[in-house]
Amino acid sequence: MTSLTSLKETLGRYGIWSFALRSEHPERLTERAEATAELEELGFGALWLGGSPGVRHAVPLVEATSRLVVATGIQSIWQYGATETASEFAELEAAHPGRFLLGLGVSHAPLTEQYRRPYARMVEYLDALDAAGQPAERRVLAALGPKMLRLSRDRAAGSHPYLVTPEHTAQAREELGETPLLAPELKVVLDTDPDRARATARATLAMYLTLPNYTGNFLRIGFTEDDLKDGGSDRLVDAVFAWGDENRIRERIDAFRTAGADHVTLQVIEDRSRDALPRDGWRRLATLLK
């Protein structure tokens, strides 16, 4: 109980989720470090690295900051071995105690050739992490359905669900119970024009609508097949993206907190390459969250 309470306090209410900060290009290391340090100065409690990062991707960003927690959001269990992961975790923990959170997920069949029996494979992976000494209270699972949520409750500190709604968050909180960490991701489009904001959102959503884990979850929480067509209905887009003026975006973020989220991790979506750093957007979020 104490360790989970401490984790929640360390993460704070809000974090940033980013593909771009995962980059390993040497010429971008300084830029990444500066951007991460600014996120800490802006008051965000955590940075979640997208694109199936490994522990090594977090190291330079932990070193560039003094308080910010850097998390994998989310590391594929098919891509990184458990023994290797546990060893790298222990090394980073020894150098910077409490600054890294291991996020794990099973990825998706269309993206992973070896994808078989994902739940059983996750259990095996957690068993191997336990055997190697990686502490369960310092990891979270990308869980959407009830079975994986229960595993998050029993074998990890909690869950980091991606591409979800406040309604899913409420269901996840009920499944997890009160104590485990619940840290959903929410995409944010800082644009007040409905047509333009939804077009930007759909450009990002398109890829996810090809992945059965996400479409199945949408159907499970009340959307229909029609909602999944043509890039996603307005209803679906408006449920999984926060867009509009600052008041509307704040209301959408607050809806996740009201539904039971301990920590909301925010991904700024812009009409440009996902490798670009949306630093102005991060600054605007920090202002509206004060």
Image (cartoon, rainbow, N blue to C red):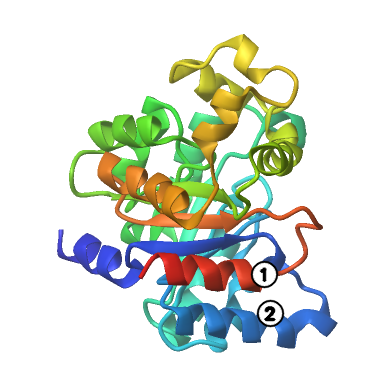
Classed neighbour count for the residue bearing mark 2: other residues with Cα under 10 Å, few (<14), some (14–19), many (≥20): many
**Quadrant housing residue 134:** bottom left
Q: Is residue 154 left or right of residue 207?
A: left
**x, y percent for residue 34:** 64, 86
Q: Which mark is residue 62?
A: none
**x, y percent for residue 264:** 41, 54
Q: In this view, does 226 lie to the left or right of 7?
A: right
- How many numbered callouts? 2
* Residue highlighted by disc 1: 21
Which of the pair 245/271 is nearer the observer? 245
Which of the pair 281/21 is nearer the observer? 281
Mark 1 → mark 2, Cα distance in angstroms: 6 Å
Helix, strand or loop at disc 1?
Answer: helix
Q: In the displayed structure, would residue 106 be above or below residue 3?
A: above
Which of the pair 107/217 is nearer the observer? 217
Q: Which residue is painted at 59% across and 32% down in the image?
A: 237
* Residue highlighted by disc 2: 32
**x, y percent for residue 142:** 48, 43
Residue 133 seen in the figure: no
Classed neighbour count for the residue bearing mark 1: other residues with Cα under 10 Å, few (<14), some (14–19), many (≥20): many
Q: Which residue is painted at 39% across and 31% down in the image?
A: 168
Amino acid bearing label 1: Leu
Q: Which residue lies furthest to the top in this view?
A: 225
Amino acid bearing label 2: Arg
The quarter of the image holding the C terminus is bottom left
Q: Which residue is painted at 54% across and 73% down in the image?
A: 283
Helix, strand or loop at disc 2?
Answer: helix
Labelled pair 1, 2 in contact (Cβ < 8 Å): yes
Residue 227 seen in the figure: yes
Q: Which residue is painted at 55% across and 48% down in the image?
A: 244
